Image (cartoon, rainbow, N blue to C red):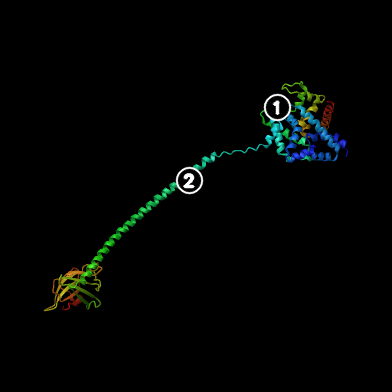
Amino acid sequence: MSLDSLVEQFKKKDVLAFEQLYAMYSENICSVINTIVKNEGRAQEICQDVFIKIWNSSDSYNASKGRFFTWILNIARNSAIDEIRSRSYKNEKKNLSADFFVGIVERKDETDDGMDTSGLKRLVDNLKEKCLQLIELLYYRGYTQKEAAEELDIPVGTVKTRNRSCISQLRENMERN
Amino acid sequence: MDTQEYISSGILELYVAGALSEKENLEVAAYAEEYPEINDEIIAIEKALLELTKISSTSKPYSFTKLKEGIYKPKQTKVIPLEREKTVWPMYLGWAASLLFAMGLFWSYNQNQNLKSELEAVSQQNSLLEVQIADADASLENTRTLLNTIRDKNIDVVPLAGQTVAPDAYAKVYWNKTEQKVFIDAKGLPEPPDGFVYQIWSLKLSPSLTPTSIGILDTFNEDENKVFALENSNASEAFGITLEPAGGSESPNLEQLYTLGAVSAS
């Protein structure tokens, strides 16, 4: 079954279709949430809530406005960001800042919290720091093109072209692995 | 349209990120449907992102079975405590009930007072009526006695006719010779003026006209029956009634002779 027809069935509240979509995307979504909340247990709970939300609002997905993955990614990012905003973090600023990828590159293979980042490291090995920052802002934080330009203090047009080259580099790395 | 140029602009990467405006999204989606190479490029970009996001962190999702529990779990309805109202309503009811009770009590008290005064009035009226009944009884008894008296076989009836001063006046004398009593029926006499009374005279005609007073009607105005009982031990031949000054006179004032009648020979 193609992705389009799966999504169509899902919109008709077909649980089997939803189960397949869950198998396809749940790891990615939970992972994105965890990079934001940095708490595996909490990330699992939020991830569960996000998929319940997705199921309940299946009617509102419109294929002519974006990819299905983009839609659920957006819901997941908003839920995770709401979570860290509502939590009384001692160093909230640090958690809201886009330092995840940069930090991973700087750290060793086995991080302090026992996370195995070797696969990720291989994937982003030769990516420059400004690429990692941009990818994190656009894909993990949900920044718009304009917001990312302001955050990184670069022209709006540069965001588009730089991101294009960063993602191309990523795709090359994938081919190589 | 140059699809390669469009692809290399980097807009498709932003489309997958969800970083475009609504209008741009619609545009990209429309091109993706029209040009397969654009659609393929989008899928390739998404695949790279799926790879990246999958390995960027290790947060294992729950099983789909567990997710299904969350989907089908009925929404918890908030329980609104009713305790407050529970305590308030009986209180209001209590106040209302006691108010009604107090009003009822006041009303009953008033009714009772009214009945009491009514009862008093009625019992007063009752005793008045009792007096009236006693009076009526006495009056009836008098009338019976009177009736029996004048029906007595020993009675002589002497009609007295009106004289010059009062031609319309009349009276009757019922004379019981054995009991030496007379009953004067003075119904036909006018009321005497103030300071005067009627005086009854027994008359002997022969050998000369000799009047003897047998009494005065000093209760004329008060007596309803206008029947007066008097003693008469005389061998009367006629009876006359004159108007005399209060207290009566020694001898009759014949100018004020109201009625006169002779006893018929028996």
Q: Quadrant of the N terminus of chain A?
A: top right
Tell which subunit mark 1 falls on: A
Residue pointed to by mark 2: B96
Q: Is residue B62 left or right of residue B170?
A: right
Question: Residue A170 appears at what percent x and percent y?
Answer: 82, 28
Tell me which amino acid carries mark 2.
Ala
What is the crowding at mark 2: few (fewer than 14 residues within 10 Å), some, or many (at least 20)?
few
Disc number placed over residue A40 in the picture, else none: 1
Quadrant housing residue B132: bottom left
Q: Quadrant of the C terminus of chain A?
A: top right
Q: CA distance from mark 2 to mark 1?
A: 62 Å
Q: Is residue B145 left or right of residue B235?
A: right
Residue found 50% across the figure and 43% down from its top: B92
**Number of residue marks:** 2
Quadrant housing residue B264: bottom left
The answer to whether residue B69 is visible is: yes
